[in-house]
């Protein structure tokens, strides 16, 4: 059985001034198709600490900010939990040492470090998603899309999303677990917890 590993880098351009949601579904589908891997997994990973990868339904409708309705609903919730960085010293980060480090690596100004909100939001969402490949197709269901989110909105900048595919080019046989029978995960009560209690008759009299 042949085992393959394929890696690709998707280059993106975020717009700044508001978090950017990149729909990279078509690109990841294409990378999987061209990889030749029939069964395995694909990891979609952010190269950056202020970015996330999310799997969610496509909302179809867009607002004047060019965000899908569901994306803006999500952003509204994140702004309540982690407000936009709008004032100096609103957060502890960045401190003076980090600001100097930014100048050392030739950041265009101290303002580029005022992205604490982006770092914290990325922590909540995580920087990666792993998806199963079945018979050469991503197992995303009927409605799911793959989004790369750039929470850092202090400036427009290029971003990178890394895609790693691992799997076999051959069939894997039957996937049915337990012969396809439904696995009952509901709580099971022993017989002694289901026996008659005299209190039942008392309650009927009330």
Image (cartoon, rainbow, N blue to C red):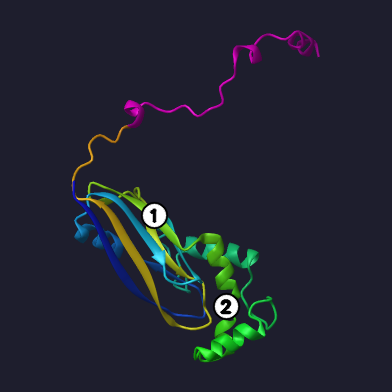
Indicate whether 7 appears above or below 99.
above
Callout 2 secondary element:
loop
Residue 123 image point, x, y percent: 55, 64
Q: Give the number of the disc on residue 130.
A: 1
User: Which of the pair 24/2 is nearer the observer?
Assistant: 2
> How far, Cα to Cα, is label 2 from label 1?
27 Å
Indicate whether 15 appears above or below 151.
below
Please tell me whether residue 195 belongs to the stretch shown in magenta. Answer: yes
Bounds of the magenta segment: 177-206
Please tell me whether residue 115 belongs to the stretch shown in magenta. Answer: no
Residue 36 image point, x, y percent: 19, 56
Residue 164 image point, x, y percent: 32, 61
User: Along the polypeptide, which appears first: circle 2 or circle 1?
Assistant: 2
**Could you tell me if residue 184 is visible in this image?**
yes
Residue drawn 50% across the image and 73% down it: 19
Q: Quadrant for the C terminus, please.
A: top right
Residue drawn 52% across the image and 78% down it: 153
Callout 1 secondary element:
strand
Q: Callout 1 environment at 10 Å: few (<14), some (14 to 19), or many (20+)?
A: some
Q: Which residue is mark 2?
A: 115
Residue drawn 64% across the image and 65% down it: 80
């Amino acid at each position: 059985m042949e085992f393959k590993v394929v890696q690709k880098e998707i280059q993106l351009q975020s717009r700044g001034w508001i978090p950017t949601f990149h729909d990279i579904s078509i690109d990841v589908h294409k990378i999987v198709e061209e990889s030749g891997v029939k069964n395995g997994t694909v990891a979609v990973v952010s190269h950056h600490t202020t970015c996330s990868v999310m799997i969610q339904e496509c909302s179809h409708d867009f607002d004047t900010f060019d965000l899908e309705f569901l994306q803006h609903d999500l952003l509204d919730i994140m702004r309540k939990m982690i407000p936009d960085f709008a004032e100096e010293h609103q957060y502890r980060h960045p401190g003076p040492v980090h600001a100097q480090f930014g100048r050392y690596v030739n950041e265009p100004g101290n303002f580029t470090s005022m992205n604490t909100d982006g770092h914290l939001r990325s922590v909540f969402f995580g920087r990666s998603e792993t998806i199963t490949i079945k018979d050469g197709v991503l197992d995303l269901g009927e409605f799911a899309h793959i989004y790369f989110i750039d929470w850092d909105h202090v400036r427009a900048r290029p971003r990178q999303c890394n895609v790693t595919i691992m799997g076999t080019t051959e069939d894997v046989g039957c996937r049915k677990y337990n012969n396809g029978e439904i696995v009952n995960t509901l709580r099971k009560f022993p017989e002694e917890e289901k026996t008659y209690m005299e209190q039942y008759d008392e309650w009927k009299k009330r």
